[in-house]
């Protein structure tokens, strides 16, 4: 039996567990506590920064049975059902594989029925920019005036592909990339909890390779854990990531500063021989000290 992926195991189940995106958490918490939940939300931003996780947290919060200030509690029956994927009133749809107008019409027809167990029927449509023009047009009226028992949460990595008519009907939240320090700290926490020791610099190296995506960072850690014996070294990490060691990067910087073409070529050749010599990776590491 396959083990559960680390990024799924560590998916945040409450607002307090969520790393980053404080501006979104603060606004949604206030909306929940004051009873001012919108009928349609649009979450935009790069991949792996928490859009779908936030959508599930909001779905839990609007159906949670705990006092307002504690929602989502992740303890009540509705929260647990949503966390475990058993809640029939929380419908998640990947627009990349449901792009047609018929898919949109099916949503429109089903949304009219009241939820079975939950207070609010929630539709989470991921990668919503993949919907066809006809599908977007079909959804317009429903997004503008959905039934009182329905909530739409749309998520996309390419907001520029969303029609203005859709944008104007949603409350929009822009998710930002995670900082290297936030990712590294979270990786250290996960590793400690999972019984894995990280050599100094490993979490930081993974965080930089993930380019702001927490999901990518946790997936890299998961891959590294599979081949470790309880201790993860920086050398192992660099080998997997195809990263160049800091000594070669420093030598390359010195050669560039001194316009020493021969040394530049020697270092680049040495890196290429190690199989890590792709120009974008070298350039990224050379530029790191300046940012």
Image: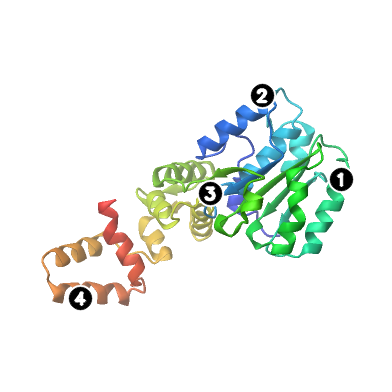
Sort mark 3 into few (<14), some (14-19) or many (20+) by Cα contacts within 10 Å.
many
Q: CA distance from mark 4 to mark 3?
A: 39 Å
State left or right for residue 184 relative to residue 246.
Answer: right
State left or right for residue 139 relative to residue 41.
Answer: right
Front position among marks 4 and 2: 2
State left or right for residue 86 relative to residue 169.
Answer: right
Give the labeled residue for mark 4: 266
Q: Which mark is residue 112?
A: 1
Q: CA distance from mark 4 to mark 2?
A: 64 Å
Sort mark 4 into few (<14), some (14-19) or many (20+) by Cα contacts within 10 Å.
some
Q: Could you tell me residue 279's position as x and y percent?
A: 33, 71
- Which is nearer the N-term, disc 1 or disc 2? 2
Q: CA distance from mark 1 to mark 4?
A: 68 Å
Vertical order, 24 against 50 (above or below): above
- Which is nearer the N-term, disc 3 or disc 2? 2
- Which is nearer the N-term, disc 4 or disc 2? 2
Q: Could you tell me residue 90's position as x and y percent?
A: 77, 45
- Which is nearer the N-term, disc 1 or disc 4? 1
Give the labeled residue for mark 2: 34
- Which is nearer the N-term, disc 4 or disc 3? 3
């Amino acid at each position: 039996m396959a083990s559960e992926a680390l990024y799924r195991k560590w998916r945040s189940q409450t607002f307090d567990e969520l790393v980053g995106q404080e501006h979104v958490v603060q606004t949604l918490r206030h909306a929940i506590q004051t009873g001012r939940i919108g009928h349609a939300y649009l979450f935009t931003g790069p991949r792996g920064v928490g859009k779908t996780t936030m959508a599930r947290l909001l779905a839990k919060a609007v159906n949670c049975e705990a006092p307002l200030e504690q929602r989502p509690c992740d303890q009540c029956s509705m929260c647990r059902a949503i966390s475990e994927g058993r809640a029939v009133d929380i419908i998640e749809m990947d627009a990349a594989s449901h792009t047609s107008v018929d898919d949109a019409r099916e949503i429109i027809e089903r949304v009219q029925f009241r939820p079975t167990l939950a207070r609010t029927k929630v539709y989470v449509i991921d990668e919503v920019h993949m919907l066809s023009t006809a599908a977007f047009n079909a959804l317009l009226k429903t997004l503008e005036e959905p039934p009182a028992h329905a909530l739409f949460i749309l998520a996309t990595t390419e907001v520029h592909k969303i029609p203005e008519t859709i944008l104007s009907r949603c409350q929009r939240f822009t998710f930002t990339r995670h900082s290297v320090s936030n990712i590294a700290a979270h990786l250290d926490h996960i590793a400690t909890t999972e019984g894995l020791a990280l050599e100094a610099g490993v979490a930081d190296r993974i965080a930089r390779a993930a380019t702001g995506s927490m999901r990518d960072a946790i997936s890299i850690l998961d891959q590294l854990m599979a081949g470790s014996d309880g201790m993860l070294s920086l050398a192992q990490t660099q080998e997997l990531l195809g990263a160049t060691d800091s000594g070669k990067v420093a030598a390359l910087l010195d050669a560039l500063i001194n316009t020493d073409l021969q040394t530049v070529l020697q270092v680049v050749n040495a890196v290429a021989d190690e199989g890590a010599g792709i120009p974008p990776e070298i350039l990224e590491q050379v530029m790191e000290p300046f940012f």
